Amino acid sequence: MTTRLNAWILLAVLAMAVWLTPPSARAEDGYDLWLRYRPLAEPAARAATPLAARIVVEGDGETLRLARAELSRGIAGLLERTPELSSDLADGALVLGPASAPRIAALDLPVADLGPEGYLIRSARIDGRAVTVITANSEVGVLYGSFEWLRRLQLGEPLTELDVRAAPKVKLRVLNHWDNLDRTVERGYSGQSIWDWHTLPGYTQTRYVDYARANASLGINGTVLNNVNTNALSLTAPYIEKAAALADVFRPYGIKVYLSARFSAPIEIGGLPTADPLDPAVAAWWKAKTDEIYAAIPDFGGFLVKANSEGQPGPQDYDRTHADGANMLADAVAPHGGVVMWRAFVYSAEDTTDRAKQAYAEFVPLDGRFRDNVIVQVKNGAIDFQPREPFHPLFGAMPETPLMMEFQITKEYLGFATHLAYLGTMYEETLQSDTHRPTAGTSVARIVDGTAENHTLTGMAGVANIGTDRNWSGSHFDQANWYVLGRMAWDPDTRAEPVARDWARRTFTPDPRFVEPVVAMMMGSREAVVDYMTPLGLHHQMATGHHYGPGPWVADLDRPEWNPAYYNKADAAGIGFDRTASGSDAIAQYAPAVAARYGDLETVDERDLLWFHHVGWDHRMASGRPLWDELVLTYDRGVAKVGDMRRSWATLVPYVDSRRFDEVSQFLAIQEQEAKWWRDASVAYFRTFADRPLPAGAAEPEHDLDYYKALSFPFAPGN
């Protein structure tokens, strides 16, 4: 008994020691994300300012209470003082509330054009008191404004003489969770599904609230709970009840719930003999099912649908079009204000000439035939979330149809969670691409935000990388990809570099001795992955199933477009996929100016060379080297960049807590080892066709080709 009592006393003492340890000295696990409200660096400045000593809330809505609580939490952590909550004004007070609140309305602030989600933060005087007003046309706008004010406080930016106006340029800003009912996550690398379906609806975890907080801090306003390769059970009453419990948690944060709908659900759970979208009984079943969902979730956002792709059922099973299927569902959700997000990711073995062409062939003839509440969700490139892809030609080809950008946040083809690859540069590269439709200067961003074609239904989705890992995303740096997706969904013209800087300062430290090298690492990281995986326009060179390691030799799968050899087309003459007029003619799907640039060996960017051209091994590159030498040296450059990142990170130990520092260090070591694996395996394979010596200074692959071909990873995560 005495021994047990002593043990409890020891545990209590240890717990108290942890409690008394300053937060900055404690090991961190990444759970706080960028909402890491640690004390600001200058204690004297914190004590001297009267700023935010009081929070005054004009109104009593649930979302306003959340805004007040977030501000209290942030101020207490950053300024190390708890602000007073009062209805009385004082100098330095934060005044929160909708623009219609009497004391705020008296200021006659310009909020009319901010829409339902925009916000205004302004230094003002009310009743003779110098205050900061955070206001909007809605409570959720006030919440967004509160997060922005905290961001500025966190980064040490000036908080006097403020006049900040912001409104989202994109209406639907959504995370797509590829989460299954058994809690596995397709292409997920951060543990189990965040949704514990077994304990819902009775138990809603605190983690769900923190998920909502993180998304609201970025302006993300929707979440698709289940995998696009969905199970019809997601639409049954027990799971609708579970989704409703999550919707109740998310609603005050301005987040709507959506569900992926299985097109064959009328057969699988409805007992009908068909799912033909033009069959009145099928339409009636979907209307009744939709009414059932809205009865449980009044603000349900609508459906996301993957149809007639990778074996999923769809309207083409009944000789109907994508428009027929989408419109039937759109009619069901329309009375409730819902939308249908219909994915354009379709491919099959019907056209063996070029998988990249199929979405264009199926969707362009349907332009203008979708209901007003349908938005077609298009991946950033025409293949499948590759380390680099030219922008999808659909973005310049469907002027009568709203198009929604689909990016992948989880890194299915970029080394999973273990490889550092900041995707902000990829997102920016795509969004700033010029479609030249209808004229030069029409960027993909202008298509996505609706301004090019005057669409009001607009959207951007990110395939989520969130799971049950304490750091949410499997690695600390993968949090940045969730962060930048949210920022670019709010404004597609946002640039990657300032967002990387912003994230690094909030997530680690604002110390420039840390921030500058880390931002340099982030900005070059995705290019490093491209170099050691798919250089010079190569694509889809990942081995079968797991999409983890290299497999450029794979050529024995049933469907031609599943095979990496289908894409590299390496032979004795050269390498690359000919998409010019002499090949598949996929370039004809772009505007003439874009097609002309891509189609000419003299004008195509070398980063896209092998995407559009089959090029001889001795083709002279811009460097003056032959293609074979350039290819090998580009692989080498990618490996070297990872080595540079490891060495740079190793110098930053004084600025990072030991736990996060060690985790990043170990992942960078894995990345360097696997980058070399990618390089060696690819060089060993392509050399069998090039039949040329390695360029001077290039090392021989560590093993022979048979060694690399024999490697197998049947239990890789996310598979």
Image: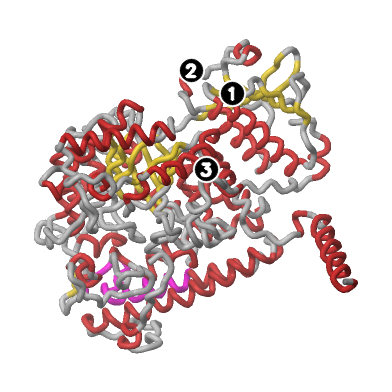
Is mark 2 in CB contact (under 8 Å) with mark 1?
Answer: no
Q: Which mark is residue 231?
A: none
- Residue at image coords 32%, 77%: 682
Task: Answer left or right for 27 relative to 432.
Answer: right
Residue identified by numbered label 3:
215
Task: Tell me which numbered mark, 1 or 3, is placed earlier along the sequence.
Answer: 1
For residue 394, above or below residue 581: above
- Residue at image coords 54%, 39%: 249
Task: Tell me which numbered mark, 2 or 1, is placed earlier along the sequence.
Answer: 2
* Amino acid bearing label 1: Thr
- Residue at image coords 14%, 37%: 278
The part of the chain drawn in magenta is 618-641
Residue 443 pos. (x, y %): 32, 40
* Amino acid bearing label 2: Ala
Res 156 quadrant in image: top right
Choose mark 1 or mark 3, whichever is in front: 3
For residue 678, above or below residue 73: below
Q: Secondary structure at mark 2?
A: helix
Badge 1 crowding class, 10 Å Cα cut-off, few under 14, some 14 to 19, many 20 or more, is many
Badge 3 crowding class, 10 Å Cα cut-off, few under 14, some 14 to 19, many 20 or more, is many
Residue identified by numbered label 2:
112
Q: Viewer-proximal residue, 199 or 209?
A: 199
Q: Cα distance, mark 1 to mark 3? A: 20 Å
Q: Viewer-proximal residue, 59 or 622?
A: 59
Q: Cα distance, mark 2 to mark 1? A: 11 Å
Magenta stretch: includes residue 648: no
Residue identified by numbered label 1:
135
* Amino acid bearing label 3: Asn
Choose mark 2 or mark 3, whichever is in front: 3
